[in-house]
Amino acid sequence: MLVVEFEKGTVVLKQAPMPKRRPGEALIRLLAAGICNTDLELLRGYYNFQGRPGHEFVGEVVESSTPELVGQRVVGEINIGCGRCSLCRAGDPRHCSSRRVLGILNYPGVFAEYFTLPDRNLHVLPRTIPTDHGVFVEPLAAANEILEQVRIPKGAPVAVLGDGKLGLLIAQVLTAHGAEVHLFGRHPSKLALARRWKIRTRLSSQGPAKAAFQWVVEATGSPEGLGAALELVQPRGTIIAKTTLHGAVPLDISRVVVNEVTIVGSRCGRFPPAIRLLQRRSVDVAPLVTARMPLSQAQEAFQLAAEPGTLKVLLVPDGTI
Amino acid sequence: MLVVEFEKGTVVLKQAPMPKRRPGEALIRLLAAGICNTDLELLRGYYNFQGRPGHEFVGEVVESSTPELVGQRVVGEINIGCGRCSLCRAGDPRHCSSRRVLGILNYPGVFAEYFTLPDRNLHVLPRTIPTDHGVFVEPLAAANEILEQVRIPKGAPVAVLGDGKLGLLIAQVLTAHGAEVHLFGRHPSKLALARRWKIRTRLSSQGPAKAAFQWVVEATGSPEGLGAALELVQPRGTIIAKTTLHGAVPLDISRVVVNEVTIVGSRCGRFPPAIRLLQRRSVDVAPLVTARMPLSQAQEAFQLAAEPGTLKVLLVPDGTI
């Protein structure tokens, strides 16, 4: 079968044997996968990653010990816990200290015709959600995690920094929650998209209003993002940090202390609320798909995904476009 | 009268005219003042400070439009708000955007024989609290602010990084609250002092246990402190940041995001709970006084305060030692 791997900072195509599922795992045929900024960071050396990436997907279960799953269209949570620690036993392996992470850490990813994942990680995708939209369940869950961590009152003004894929999802999720979202970005075309969703927008080059928001979400993917968030947040306000980057960023710690700012790191979310957001059409993901390309064109797909104007690039099995 | 000022990174002694109190202000005679790490930072260039520092004090009110205050021994909150913004009108000028700060920002400090402060900033020091102990009300309030920001359950293990003046106060305040405090420091003599208060201690050079605490207080005063706190905090744990430093510190933002760590900046606290802590003898501040020196020896006092083994150095008017 055809697979995509990262080797020394390059994208390579390979033929590999079909994966063998272990007990408790399902064998899944890829229907569509999404290229995420984390994949681009992994390609640049984050986590010293080598191997098969990919963690946003919709697939069809081919084999499983759970008969109800076979033949179903599924999405999958990306953290594979040890199954034995207190966190895993409580049903949440997201912070299991010996977790593997699909396509990120010690577990081969989904940029392949077939892959495996434990049955317990899978969620059946309701029929009303198209496959291309289902690819957004994972990043939507990450966007929705903010609301599981921080109480944002309805009607409250919230700044979202970054008009990339994740920023646009976060802006929509917070708008659906009832917040008054102000999206700050660098791309007029992406901001125009946000305005279609009735989101207030502002070009970052106009310079942000200072100390104006009690909640600021930092999703720029840039080392300067945290500093910009710190300019924008009110005293005693909260910054929700979403950017993962290889290396350290500079932090004006005195400003954090003197203004008693709270910074909340935010990563993976639960899938069921994200699936509900798509089912209820509370978010609009169709305009976020820039391109749909076959696995055999993965190199071109990654080049396109890294270009500034691009939103989501989907990879699909050859012959399904 | 004799005053202490900072000029281009040096401590200078001067003769100055008696300050004139404006309406709403009290004229206060210094009884004792404390040298704080913030003063040492100001001397090194933090805030581009020039002028008269000093913000920890006990004084006697000489003149005031509030007759009950005259003759009383008082301590004083250090933030002087505009009096007009919503924060000030709600009675809390700590984050007023045009605040002045005693001895730190646009308001002359207490390292002088006489100084002024608005009546509304003053709290009468109960008779049972000795003057030298009252100097600790301000830093104790800052230590206690942690408990107003973060809910720490009784019995919970908490790491406190830094065995300096503030770290030792925080360790005591959290112990009095019922937490199981583990103090990490570099100074065997200061850690021995903490053990007298039944606090668990560990030399930082032994290397901290990793990811062991849900709550970590960073009070090292060092640019490396935040990184050490990030090593020590559990996933989904909270770091309370107390260190103010001139310039930026490096932050491994991916670790904050991936582990969903919360960082809470923490500065000034309210005085009444701090006064109660001293009144009930819930904290022991007497051993924290390294020396008591006259204002005329301020240069030597600052040298001593900057030495690694030193705790609190008090400045008192000449002739009162």
Image (cartoon, coloured by chain):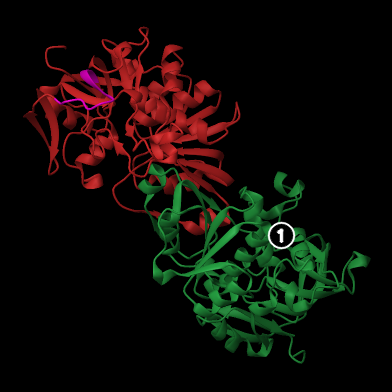
Chain colours: A red, B green
Judge from the rendering whether residue A66 lies leftward or rightward of residue B8; answer left or right.
left
Q: Residues within 10 Å of mark 1 (few under 14, many from 20)?
A: many
Instruction: Provide the secondary structure element on which disc 1 rests.
Output: strand
Q: Residue A321 appears in which quarter of the rendering?
A: top left
Type of residue at label 1?
Answer: Ile
Q: Which residue is mark 1?
A: B80
Foreground: B192 or B310?
B192
Q: Is residue B281 visible?
A: yes
Query: How far from the left and from the top, in percent, is residue A168?
Result: 39, 27
Foreground: A45 or A231?
A45
Residue at the location (45% across, 63% down)? B225
- Asked if residue A20 is among those painted magenta in the image, a careful observer would answer yes
- Asked if residue A215 is among those painted magenta in the image, a careful observer would answer no
Q: Residue lying farthest right? A: B67
In this rendering, is residue B61 above or below A16? Answer: below
Q: Residue lying farthest left? A: A15
Foreground: A174 or B240?
B240
Magenta residues span: A19-32
Query: How far from the left and from the top, in percent, is residue A160?
Result: 46, 34
In this rendering, is residue A278 above or below A301? Answer: above
Q: Residue B12 appears in which quarter of the rendering?
A: bottom right
In this rendering, is residue A49 above or below B176? Answer: above
Query: How far from the left and from the top, in percent, is residue A224?
Result: 37, 47
Residue at the location (75% across, 82% down)? B113
In this rendering, is residue B300 above or below A134? Answer: below
